[in-house]
Image (cartoon, grey):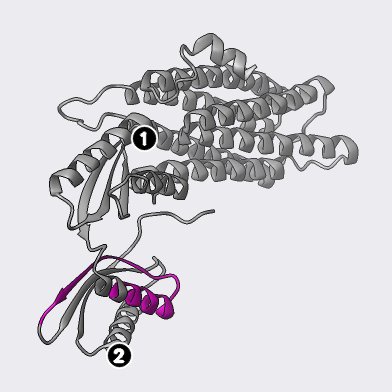
Amino acid sequence: MTDFLVKRFVKDYENVQQTVVRTQYGILSSCVGIFCNVLLFLVKLLIGLGMHSIAVTADAFNNLSDAASSVISFVGVKMASRPADEGHPFGHGRMEYIAAFIVAFLVIQVGFTFFKSSFGKILHPESISFEWVPFLILALSVTVKVWMAVFNRKLGRRIDSKVMLATAADSMGDVATTSVTIAAILVYRILGWNIDAYAGVIVSLLVIWAGIGIARETLEPLIGEPIDPELYHDITEFVESFDGIEGVHDLIVHNYGPNQSMASIHAEVPKDVDIEASHEIIDQIERRVFAEKGIYLVIHMDPVEIHDEWVLKVRQMVRDVIGQVDPGLDFHDFQMVREEEQIDLFFDLVVPYEYGEEMEDAARLKVLEMIEEKDPRFQCVIKVDRSFVGKNN
């Protein structure tokens, strides 16, 4: 069914890097969400009113909030597709994240509303009834929500959309809430225990938790996420594959919406190569990265020594010392200046994020001490730095 809908409503559906294609995917997802959730809302509302069930009614309004969420997602996707203009030179791609953040607040608000109602039912219980037809319709709604979760997850992975993946997670939350409601009805049918209000509390808490999850997922790219390790290795290995590039570091990726990224990186080039030749290589890499990966990459050249055996020997000594202090440390931007009575070493010491200020100072001082023990002429100027790449999950 998913492939049928995509082929029917998304033109050029395989070209997911194009903004217009991504927009069509977003519109398809939103329209399917609106249709399915409005249908489920109407059915569950009638069932809840007929059975005097606060849990079923809460579940119905959760579906209505999902429909409203799909409307907001639709508007967000349309706004995110607008091209760059004078006031927004990086485009409007982040509107997709903002729309999803609004959705998260709607979901949380619905959860709090029905938590209050459910708690009131605990204090003032009401009787419920069991009927097979409404019960089977609730079971069918679970099937619909499972399909919606699979549908959005598949689309989200295909176009790398955090919003669609969050929507899929929300649908699975709905599966859990409806399943709890069904369990409450079965308990009443089999044992005669009215746990409807308690089930309503569980439903509302699950809804709130789903909203918090969506908010967390959409806030991360707005605040600024670390670079995905896979993307980090993809870009660094691509740049290092060119002749004339000795190494890279300090890769930073700025996200301005799905498939809308700018990046910068430091590339080490031989210091004795003509600068125009190195610049031509840099230009070629920047053009290739944009053409093949859709990322605007700006490369800063760092000239490094690759022939002087003494410099190479000292750099390896620094690497060994840093590894002895902590295998989790690294360094880059190494420069050596030899004078008559001293040898100046300049480099950036890369420390993990779990290092506090005291640990930074301790590591830096330990590195200084161990290097000076190797040769009293060494005078180090060390700048503490951190990587922008995230950890593998």
Please identify the residue farthest to the top as the structure is shown.
8
Question: Which label is found at residue 98?
Answer: 1
Provide the residue span drawn in magenta: 314-339
Mark 2 is surrounded, within 10 Å at the Cα level, by few (under 14), some (14 to 19) or many (20 or more) other residues, namely few
Question: Which label is found at residue 373?
Answer: 2
What residue appears at the point 58 percent right and 27 percent down from the top-left corner? 63
Eyeballing the image, is 111 above or below 82?
below
What residue appears at the point 40 percent right and 54 percent down from the top-left corner? 389
Q: In the rendered structure, are the residues bearing label 1 and label 2 in contact, judged by CB atoms less than 8 Å apart?
A: no
**Mark 2 element type:** helix
Mark 1 is surrounded, within 10 Å at the Cα level, by few (under 14), some (14 to 19) or many (20 or more) other residues, namely many
> Is 225 on the left or on the right of 180, as rendered?
left
Residue 383 is at least partly visible in this image: no
What residue appears at the point 17 percent right and 57 percent down from the top-left corner? 272
Q: Position of residue 9 (x, y in %)?
A: 51, 11
> Is 90 on the left or on the right of 329, as rendered?
left
Eyeballing the image, is 382 above or below 137?
below
Residue 376 is at least partly visible in this image: yes
**Alpha-carbon distance for marks 1 and 2?**
55 Å
Please identify the residue farthest to the right as the structure is shown.
190
On whether residue 35 falls in the magenta region, the answer is: no
Counting residues from the start of the chain, the first of labels 1 and 2 encountered is 1
Q: Position of residue 293 (x, y in %)?
A: 37, 34
